[in-house]
Amino acid sequence: MRLRNRILTTVGTLFGVAVLVFVMLRAIPGDQITAGLGTEAAALTPAQRQALEQYYGLDQSLFTQFFSWLGNMLTGNFGYSARQQQSVLDLTLHSLPVTIELAVLSIVLALLIGVPLGMLAASRTNSARDALGQVVSLAGLSVPAFLLATTLLSVFAASFGFNPNGQGFATLADDPLLNLRQMLLPALVLGFGIAAPILRTTRTAVLEVRSEDFVRTARAKGVPERRLQVRHVLGNALVPIVTMTGLQFGYLLGGAVVVEQIFSVPGIGRQVLLGIQQKEYAVVQSTVLVIALAFVLVNLLTDALYRVIDPRVRAS
Amino acid sequence: MPRGAYSAVGIAAALSLALTACSSSSSPSGSAATGDGGGDAGKTIVVGVTSDPDTLFPWKATQFQAVNVLQNLYGTLTEFDKDLNVVPGLAESWQTSDDGKKLTLKLRQGVTFADGSTFGSEDVKWSLDKIMDEKTAAVARASLSSVKSVKAPDANTVVLELNGPDAALPANLATVNMAMLSSDDTEDKLNATPNGTGPFTLKNRVPSQSITLARNDAYWGDKAKAAAVEFRVIPDESSIVSAMQSGNVQLSVFDDPLVAQTAEAGGTITVAKTPQLSYHVLQLNATHGDLKDVNVRLAIQCAIDRKQVLDTAALGEGEVTGPITAPAFKSDPNNRPCPTRDLAKAADYLAKAGKASGVTVKTIVSQGEYATSVNEAQNLKAQLAEAKINLDLEVLESGAYVDRWVAADFDAAVALNGGRPDPDGSYGRYFTSDGNLNKVAGYSSPELDKLFAEGKATTDQAARKGIYDQVSTLLEQNAPWIWLFSGYTYTATTAGVQGFVPMASGSLQFLRTTSVS
C-alpha cells in the first residue's frame, strides 16, 4: 500500500514537472528559428518561415506537441537534437554518467572536509577550532563557485601550466587518470561549497547528541573517548547529516551549470543550458524529466539509508 | 577528549595531501599533452571556441562558430582575399554582358566533393535554384534577388540571367551561405556528414565538445598546411585563455577587449587586433512616436560623444565610425551634422521639433549577446540625459531581444550589426523601401532607393565609392540610426603558430595557410 502510494506520488510529481517545463519553455520569448538565425530571422519571407516551422514541428498545436512528446518518452524515444545530430537518449547516456561522477566526487570531498571540521568545531564550542569551522563554512557559503573556479583555473594554468580541462574531455572509460585530473578542480570547487552546510549540520547535530544522557552514561561506564565520539556521538548524529548530504547530492544531479561551463565538463547541466539557448524543446523537456527522476530516486535512497543507520526507523 | 575528532581531521588532511600530490605529480604530463591530436603535435591546430556549430548546413548558418567551421569545409563560386577583394573561387573567371543583364561564370575543372564526386555546372545550377526557392529557407536568398534564372550550357559554364545589372553579385556569391553543394545531397544528409569542396573535410565530431577537420588532399588550391584542425569547445572565454596558457589550445578569436587584455598580459600569448566590419549602433525606429521627426533624431546624434561610448564601454578598443565600415567604401566618420558632441545644437533640434522639454525613447538592450552592450547603453543614457533625452532602457535576455528586434518592436535598440565587404549587401536590405530588413531599419526614402539602385548598376569601383559616399551622407543627415564605433577582432595565438591571417570579417578562412611548429 505504502509502495503504491509512493509510486503514485512519484508519477504525479514527474507529470507535474513535465507540464511545468513544457509551459515554461513556451513562455520564454523566441523559438528554435530565432534561436538559430538570430536577427537574420527578420529577413525571412512568410513562406520561408512557414517552411522552417514545419521543419521544426512548430506548426503543430501545443496539445499535439505535448502529448506526442510524452507518448514518445514512454516508448523510450526522448526526442532528437538537430543541433547535435544525436538522440536525446544518447546525449543523456553520455552526460548523465559524467554528472553522477562529478556529484559523487564532490560529495566525497564535501564529507571529507565538512564532517571532520564539524566534529572539530563541536568538540569545544566558542574556541579557536570552533571559529575555524565557522570561517570555513562561511567561506564555503559566501565565495561564489564561479569566482573560485575561475581563480583556481587561471592560477593553476598560468603559474604551473596545470590545466587538464584544456584538453578534450576524457570519460572514466577512455582515460581514467586524465578523467580524474579533469574532475579534480570542479569537484573541489563544488565540494567546498557543499562542505559548508554539511559542516554546520554536523556541528549542530554533534552538539545536540553530546548533551544527551546516554553519552554521559557511556562516558561514566568508561567507554574509550574515540569510540564514544565515533560510535555513540557521530553514529547518532548521522541522520541529519545524511539528509543534508542527500539533498545536496540531488541538487548536484541537476547539473552544476556554472562549474561545468568554466571547466568544460560535458555534464547534464550543460546539456540543459544548450537546449534552452537553442530552444530545443525536446532536449530540455526530456533532460529535465530525467533529472527530476534522479532527484526522486536519490530521495528514496536517502530514506532507505535512514533504515540502515538508525534502528529506531527500522523498528517503526 | 577530542582525540577522535583529531583523527578524523588527520585522515581528511592526509587524503587532501594525497590528492594534491596526485595533481601536482600529474601536471607535467598535463602540459606535455599540447595539441593532443595524435602524437604529432605540430600538425594539428587546436582552436578554442565557446560553442560548437548550431548547424552544419551552410545555407542556414548564421552563428559565428558555424560559419567559421563551414567555410573550411565548403567552397563558394567567388572568395574574399585577406583585404576583402573578390577573387576567384570555384569560378575561375566571370564576365558581365554589356547590358549588365547576364553574368557568365567559367568553373574550375577537376574539383571534387569530399565524397569523391565531381563538381560541375549542374551542381551550381541546382544549388542556386535551391537557395532561391523559398521552401529551402536559405538565409542568402535575398542576395540573389536580381537573378531571374540560372542556366548550365555546358559542364564548366554557368550563366545567370539578371533582372538588371548587379555589381554586388560577385561579392554576394562569396559567403558560405552561398556554398556550392552536390545536387545529390539533402539538408539532413549534410547535417550529419558535410560534403563540400573546401580545404578540409570533417574527420570527427563529439557533440558540444569538439569538431575535428582533416586536410582535404584533393583540394583544388594550395593544400592546407596543417594535417588537422580541432575546434575545441571551451564555453568560457577566460577558460580558453587558461587553456592557451597551459599550451592545450593554440589559436582563438575573442571579441571582448577585456579577455584580450587578460590573454596578452601573461606574455605567452600574442594577440593581433583587426578592425571589424561589424559596427555598434543605436538604431532608432523612425516610424515610432517622437522619432518620426528628423529633428529629434538629430538631437540624439548631437548629444552623443561616440568616443566616450567607445572609451567607457569597450576600453577605447576600436574606432569611431560612420555607416560604412568596409575598407574600400569606408565612410568619413566626421561627415555628419554633429561631428562632435554639441549639446546646444541638440537643444536647438529639440526646440525645432517642439520638444524643448525633452523626449523619452524606449530602448531595448541585449544582455549577453555581446560583451559591451549594457555598458554602451548605460553610457548613452547618461549622455543623453544631459540633453533632456530620456533613454528608457529595457535590458533583455538575448532570445527576448531578438524577438523584439525581429518584430521591430522598439523605439531604439542598442545593437551590434554585422557589416559586409560590399555596402549594397550591408545596407541595401535595410534602407531600401523593398529591402527585407526595412521594417527593422524603420527608414527609407526615394533618394536612397535611387542611390542603391545606381550602386548596383555601376561596375566602376571609383564611381561606386562616390555613390555610397552619398548614401552615407544621406543616412547621417537623416539620422535613422546613430552609428557609434567599430571594435576589433582579437586573434590570440601561442608561440609557434605561423601563417594565420586575421580578417576584418572575423573569418577563419586562413586556417588553411596556418601551421604549428
Image (cartoon, coloured by chain):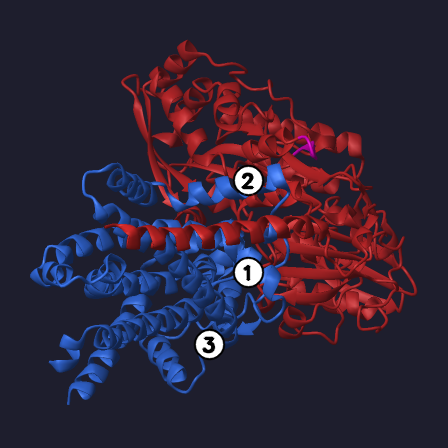
Chain letter belonging to callout 3 = A
Tell me the SS state at disc 2: helix
Seen in the picture, residue B101 relative to B413 is either above or below; the reply is below
User: Could you tell which of marks 3 and 1 lies nearer the N-terminus?
Assistant: 3
Report crowding for label 1: few under 14, some 14 to 19, many 20 or more residues within 10 A (C-alpha).
many
Tell me the SS state at disc 3: loop
Report crowding for label 3: few under 14, some 14 to 19, many 20 or more residues within 10 A (C-alpha).
many
User: Could you tell which of marks 1 and 2 lies nearer the N-terminus?
Assistant: 2
Q: How far apart are marks 1 and 2 (CA)?
A: 19 Å
Q: Majority secondary structure of the magenta segment?
A: strand
Q: Distance between the residues labelled 3 and 2?
A: 38 Å
What span is in magenta?
Answer: B267-275
- Near-viewer residue (A74 or B83): A74
Amino acid type assigned to the residue bearing label 3 in the image:
Gly
Residue A180: give its label.
1
Q: x and y percent of residue A199 in the render?
A: 28, 51
Residue A154: give its label.
2
Q: x and y percent of residue B432 in the render?
A: 56, 42
- Near-viewer residue (A76 or B138): A76
Amino acid type assigned to the residue bearing label 2 in the image:
Ser
> Does B269 appear in magenta?
yes
Q: Closer to us: mark 3 or mark 2?
A: 2
**Residue B516 shown left or right of residue A44 in the figure:** right
Q: How far apart are marks 3 and 1 (CA)?
A: 31 Å
Chain B drawn colour: red
User: Quick one: which residue is furthest to the front in this view?
Assistant: A222
